[in-house]
């Protein structure tokens, strides 16, 4: 009987050790995700030029996102304690806690005026880069002797003007013919 108790005790110890390792790994991954999040968010805030209200709103959003992460860590700890006390806990619960927390934290950040300002600056930078690339490609095309977009647009405008003039001449000609026939 004592061998049986020893086996049960060893199995329990092994299970608790595995759960502790899983919890430690989960907490470490959470901390790494939070650190990456904080780094990218602070880079975005420091690289962008925004008004004080936007900056304050961004910090508040970050604080709310941090609260979401802390709540997730607390729920993870509680569920780990439940599992350690023998309650059957589905491992997917841990994944779901982190996924829903990540989504909620992202919503907290993305709903701020700081995020909108940073995105606006990013989009403007992308549009400026696109314009520079377009200008460069048009210059290259012109140097190769091919018609550029500007050349084609100018030809199109001239054709429209020629059609307008032709239509005006046709109408005048029709009026003259009508007058001669009467």
Image: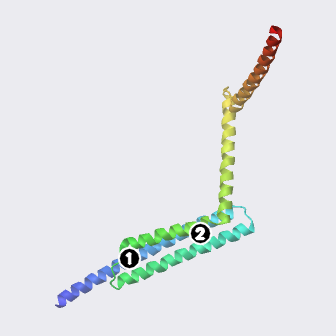
- Residue situated in front as seen by the camera: 35 or 157: 157
What residue is shown with label 1? 21
User: Given this view, does label 1 or label 2 mark the residue nearer the observer?
Assistant: 2
Toward the top, the furthest residue is 181
Relative depth, front residue between 119 and 171: 171
Task: State the mark number for residue 108.
Answer: 2
In primary-sequence order, the first of circles 1 and 2 is 1
Disc 1 to disc 2, C-alpha distance: 31 Å
The residue drawn where x is 66% and y is 41% is 133
Q: Is residue 63 above or below residue 172?
A: below
Say left or right for 167 vs 102: right
Residue 12 in the image: above or below residue 102: below
- Disc 1 element: helix
Q: What quarter of the picture does the N terminus occupy?
A: bottom left
**Local crowd size for mark 2, using a 10 Å CA cut-off: few (<14), some (14–19), many (≥20):** many
Q: Residue at x 66, y 53 (%)?
A: 123
Counting from the top left corner in percent of width and height, residue 22 is at: 38, 75
Which quarter of the picture shows residue 10? Answer: bottom left
Which residue shows up at 49% across the image and 76% down it? Answer: 72
Residue at (46, 79) in percent of width and height: 75
Q: Quadrant of the C terminus?
A: top right
Side of 37 where 113 appears, left or right: right
- Coordinates of residue 32 in the picture (x, y in percent): 50, 70
Residue 116 lies in quadrant: bottom right
Residue 34: percent from the left, percent from the top? 54, 70
Please rate how many residues cluster around mark 1, counting C-alpha atoms within 10 Å: few if below 14, some from 14 to 19, many from 20: few
């Amino acid at each position: 009987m004592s061998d049986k108790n020893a086996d049960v005790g060893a199995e329990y110890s092994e299970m608790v050790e595995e759960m502790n390792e899983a919890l430690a790994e989960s907490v470490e991954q959470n901390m790494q995700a939070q650190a990456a999040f904080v780094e990218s968010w602070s880079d975005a805030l420091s690289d962008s030029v925004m008004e004080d209200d936007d900056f304050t709103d961004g910090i508040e959003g970050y604080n709310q996102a941090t609260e979401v992460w802390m709540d997730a860590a607390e729920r993870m700890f509680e569920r780990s304690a439940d599992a350690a006390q023998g309650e059957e806990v589905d491992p997917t619960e841990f994944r779901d806690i982190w996924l829903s927390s990540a989504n909620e934290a992202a919503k907290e950040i993305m709903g701020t005026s700081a995020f909108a300002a940073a995105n606006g600056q990013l989009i403007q930078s992308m549009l400026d880069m696109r314009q520079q690339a377009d200008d460069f490609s048009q210059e290259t095309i012109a140097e190769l002797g091919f018609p550029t977009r500007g050349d084609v647009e100018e030809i199109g405008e001239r054709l429209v003007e020629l059609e307008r003039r032709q239509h005006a001449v046709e109408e005048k000609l029709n009026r003259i013919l009508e007058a001669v026939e009467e």
